[in-house]
Image: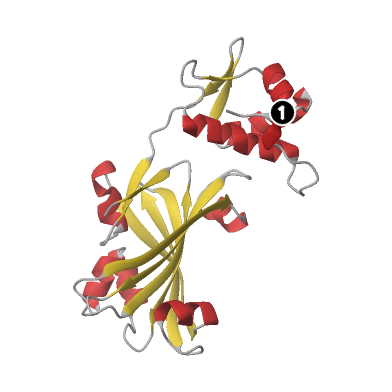
Amino acid sequence: MVGQKQIQRQTGVALWRQIADRIRASINHGDFDGTGMVPAETVLALQFGVNRHTVRSALAALGQEGVVRAVQGRGTLIERKEKLNFPISKRTRFSQGIGDQVREARGLLLDLAEEPASAEVARWLKLREGTNVIRFETIGTADKRPVSRATSWFPADRFAGIGEAYRKAGSITKAFREMGLPDYVRATTEITAMHADAADIADLELSPGAIALVTRAMNTDLAGVPVQYAITRFAADRVQFTIEN
């Protein structure tokens, strides 16, 4: 349950932002399911040890994100929205993962370049730093609504032309197939959560302060050779992860 002990002053993070995050966490935890309403501003102000104006700012931010809605004469109603379930497994695929939950799942290519691998990219792809890689930026959509944006890197000597193949197919799996790789597996996935940055807000159509789920993932061919390193940012209010063995 939300409470004053969770709010830290002099951290550089605005109090209203901290309160909004705690209220969102409580909603996700089901703390308010009995009423379907967020506690009154006066109650929250007392719990957090702040004034009502600070609480009002937090609720306004959550309202912009679509998490809650103010109802005249009743208070603040929790908006119930079904999230897309995105499975992370040995064969993680965007289109297949959410395909049975939406009418259309597709990837859109935003940018494409060949560049020297940074130290991070080289480490994930097990290449020498400076080796050429193909990078492209993509948006994953579900029924034309953006749910993820990703930066992916591929060894250039093996996958020359994969960007154009992806542009036509809208799918990593189909692009790999076009490049002569019929199957691949997920070797590693790291998941973190953070506030959406400016690019997230623009590309995923989020409100300032919204939460993004961030994955760093490496796919390999069936011989264990890395074929893709990707950093993907998901809109947390639209997607939840299920880890499958």
Relative image position of residue 155 (x, y in whole percent): 38, 83
Q: Residue at x 47, y 41 (%)?
A: 237
Q: Secondary structure at mark 1?
A: helix
Side of 53 relative to 130 (left or right): right
Does residue 216 lie above or below 25 as drawn?
A: below
Does residue 37 lie above or below 169 as drawn?
A: above
Farthest residue in the front direction? 5
Farthest residue in the top direction? 73
Mark 1: give few (<14), some (14-19) or many (20+) Cα within 10 Å: many
Q: In what quadrant of the picture does the C terminus appear?
A: bottom left
Does residue 159 lie above or below 44 as drawn?
A: below
Residue type marked 1: Phe
- State the residue position of label 1: 48
Relative image position of residue 118 (x, y in whole percent): 53, 82
Relative image position of residue 80 (x, y in whole percent): 44, 27
Q: Residue at x 28, y 52 (%)?
A: 244
Relative image position of residue 174 (x, y in whole percent): 24, 68
The quadrant where residue 163 appears? bottom left
Q: Residue at x 56, y 24 (%)?
A: 69
Does residue 179 appear anywhere in the picture?
yes
Side of 207 relative to 154 (left or right): right
